[in-house]
Each structure stands twice: as structure tokens, then as C-alpha cells.
């Protein structure tokens, strides 16, 4: 097996909760609590879960946009959080982020060509005379025309803005792209176009994706492996086919039951979870999901389940399995 492009081992990210005039730390928001992920070159790993489960924090910590609390993150065998600012700057172009809301990530006063090309100049990857050609190449790869280069963000539709966001990441010729809910704000028909674009770019450029989403029907079309997060912890990981055919964790089953069925005559039992996701400041003891799990037992309330392989590289953290 080739060397993994990205290795995340036992990653934790806690945010301090302060109180009083002296800003004393009285607790921690456990946004990410012991997560491990491995991505092979050319692979797409889907990270799914409800809002507030810590998916976006995982992506931002991997890119070192926020510092880790504990654990290890290796990109091509290099510990990202051990690099100096200069060393990190050199490796930045190889790891790129695509935001959920492309409009808020674009400066409304800057033309699209300048927004896409500024990173090339900032990292010294080309001369000023070469920027325009590289930007036009990236726009074309993302399905945009050459005349778009001199327009401003407000002149584009939501789908076009997301293509611009993809082009801005693509122009640096990265190896790893972390896509943080890149289609959740788009219409269904536009979502399909963007997903097809991701797939096309992966095939032509050999890209590796960490695709973050709350929608299992979206990751089904793009991802080869899927991890299910809940309250900062990984509940289940498996290949796409294995997860959809044989979900083991009650939380995964609940998420899958909410995926629309394209054939109306087919029926699927809908599992409705009671209550809201607990606070990450004071997560439940034992299994974090036991407060909403319809099958919870006494052991679930007292003991943390071990995240273990149950066969076929299918991992799950549940006392019931």
C-alpha cells in the first residue's frame, strides 16, 4: 500500500470557556475529541454528521488554521503542527480549503481574476505576466468563461461563485482539498453539477478530497469511504458501499433513514431522533449518543465504547455491535 497522503491520529481540539474579569478557564468546548483519519492519494473521504458535531473544526485543524489540543496530523509524512511559519507557508499551496459560503469568502471589491491569482503571486509560484493565463486555465477547468475574469462577485450566481471558489483552490495545483459543505447552500440541480465537477477534477488531476457534509445522499455520489461524527467523536467508518448496505451504529441508521428515496413506491422506516445534540462543554458520560439512542442500555451510560474493526475495514464505536 502506498504511503498515506494524510494521517490524522487521535486528534483533539478543545476551546477554553472563560468567565469573570480575569477570564479564568472554567471549562472546555470539546469540539473534536479523539478523531483518527487516513487518506490515500486520489481518495475521497466523506465526513458527515449533524451541525455542531465538529466536522468543520477537523478540517480547519488539519490545515492548521487553528491549533490542535492533542494528537498528530501528518501530510506526506510531515507533522503539520511541528513546522515553523516559514515551513508551513511553503507547504500551504499543496493543501487547500473550499468554503461553504463562497460569497462571504470573496472580497466584493476585488475582481475575480485578481481574487484567484493573488495566491499565486503571494507564494511566488509565477510572475505577474503568467498570472492571467493560469487564472484563465483554472476558470476553464471549472466551467467558467474567459470574460468572467474581470467581473465582481455580485455579478455571479451561487453556483458560479462556488466554481470560483474551486478555481481559487485549483490554481495552486494542490494535492489535498478540504471541501467544507461546498454544496449545502446550492439548489439541488446545481449541487449535482458541482459534485460532477469535483469528480471530473479528481480524475483529471489526481486530487485527494476530505469532503465535509451533513447530507449522506451527497457523499454517496462522490466518496469512496465515509466517517460518521457525533459530538466530536467518530461513531462509524466504512467504505461507501459497506456503510449504505450494512450500517451498524444507531446514529448512522438514523441519518440514512432521512436520505430521500428516488422511487416513491419504496418505503423506508424513518428513525426520528429525540432531543437536540448535547452541549460539547459537558458531553454525556459513556457513549455520547446514549441520551438520544432508542436502544441505549445501562452499559452505554457508564462505559465509553471502543472504536474497533468488525471486519471488512468497518469500524464502529457501539456496545450493541
Image (tube, rainbow, N blue to C red):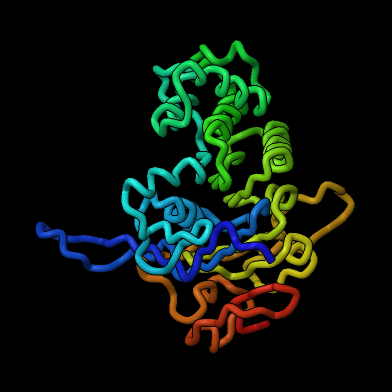
Which quarter of the image is occupied by the N terminus? bottom right
Q: Position of residue 21 (x, y in %)?
A: 10, 57
Number of marks in the image? 0
Residue under the image location 62 percent in, 28 percent down: 159
> On the picture, is 78 further left or further right than 69?
right
Residue under the image location 73 percent in, 42 percent down: 203
Which quarter of the image is occupied by the C terminus? bottom right
Q: Where is residue 273 in the image (x, y as percent from the top left)?
A: 60, 64
Can residue 253 be seen here? no
Residue closest to the far left: 21
Q: In which quarter of the image is residue 24?
A: bottom left
> On the picture, is 285 further left or further right than 306?
left
In this view, the residue in front, 258 or 104, is: 104
Q: Where is residue 243 in the image (x, y as percent from the top left)?
A: 73, 65
In this view, the residue in front, 112 or 230, is: 112
> On the picture, is 131 further left or further right than 38?
left
Residue under the image location 39 percent in, 30 percent down: 122
Residue under the image location 59 percent in, 63 percent down: 38
Can residue 314 be seen here? yes
Q: Where is residue 161 in the image (x, y as percent from the top left)?
A: 56, 26
Amino acid at each position: 500500500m502506498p504511503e498515506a497522503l494524510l494521517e490524522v491520529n487521535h486528534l483533539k481540539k478543545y476551546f477554553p470557556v472563560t468567565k469573570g474579569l480575569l477570564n479564568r478557564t472554567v471549562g472546555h468546548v470539546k469540539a473534536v475529541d479523539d478523531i483518527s483519519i487516513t487518506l490515500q492519494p486520489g481518495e475521497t473521504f466523506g465526513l458527515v454528521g449533524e451541525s455542531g458535531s465538529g466536522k468543520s473544526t477537523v478540517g480547519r485543524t488539519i490545515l492548521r488554521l487553528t491549533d490542535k489540543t492533542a494528537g498528530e496530523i501528518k501530510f506526506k509524512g510531515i507533522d503539520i503542527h511541528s513546522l515553523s511559519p516559514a515551513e508551513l507557508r511553503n507547504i500551504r499551496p499543496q493543501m487547500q480549503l473550499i468554503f461553504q459560503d463562497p460569497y462571504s469568502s470573496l472580497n466584493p471589491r476585488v475582481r475575480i481574476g485578481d481574487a484567484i491569482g493573488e495566491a499565486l503571486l503571494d507564494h511566488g509560484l509565477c510572475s505577474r505576466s503568467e498570472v492571467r493565463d493560469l487564472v484563465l486555465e483554472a476558470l476553464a477547468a471549472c466551467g467558467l468563461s474567459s470574460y468572467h475574469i474581470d467581473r465582481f462577485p455580485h455579478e455571479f450566481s451561487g453556483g458560479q461563485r462556488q466554481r470560483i471558489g474551486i478555481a481559487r483552490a485549483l490554481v495552486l495545483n494542490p494535492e489535498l482539498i478540504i471541501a467544507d459543505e461546498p454544496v449545502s447552500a446550492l439548489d439541488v440541480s446545481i449541487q449535482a453539477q458541482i459534485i460532477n465537477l469535483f469528480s471530473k477534477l479528481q480524475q483529471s488531476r489526481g486530487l485527494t478530497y476530505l469532503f465535509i457534509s451533513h447530507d449522506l445522499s451527497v457523499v454517496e455520489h462522490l466518496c469512496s469511504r465515509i466517517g460518521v461524527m457525533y459530538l466530536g467523536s467518530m461513531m462509524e467508518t466504512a467504505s461507501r458501499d459497506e456503510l449504505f448496505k450494512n450500517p451498524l451504529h444507531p446514529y448512522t441508521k438514523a441519518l440514512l433513514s432521512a436520505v430521500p428515496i428516488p422511487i416513491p413506491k419504496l418505503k423506508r422506516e424513518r428513525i426520528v431522533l429525540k432531543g437536540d445534540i448535547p452541549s460539547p462543554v459537558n458531553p454525556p458520560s459513556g457513549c455520547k449518543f446514549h441520551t438520544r439512542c432508542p436502544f441505549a442500555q445501562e452499559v452505554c451510560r457508564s462505559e465509553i465504547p471502543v472504536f474497533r474493526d468488525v471486519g471488512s475495514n468497518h469500524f464502529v464505536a457501539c456496545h450493541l455491535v
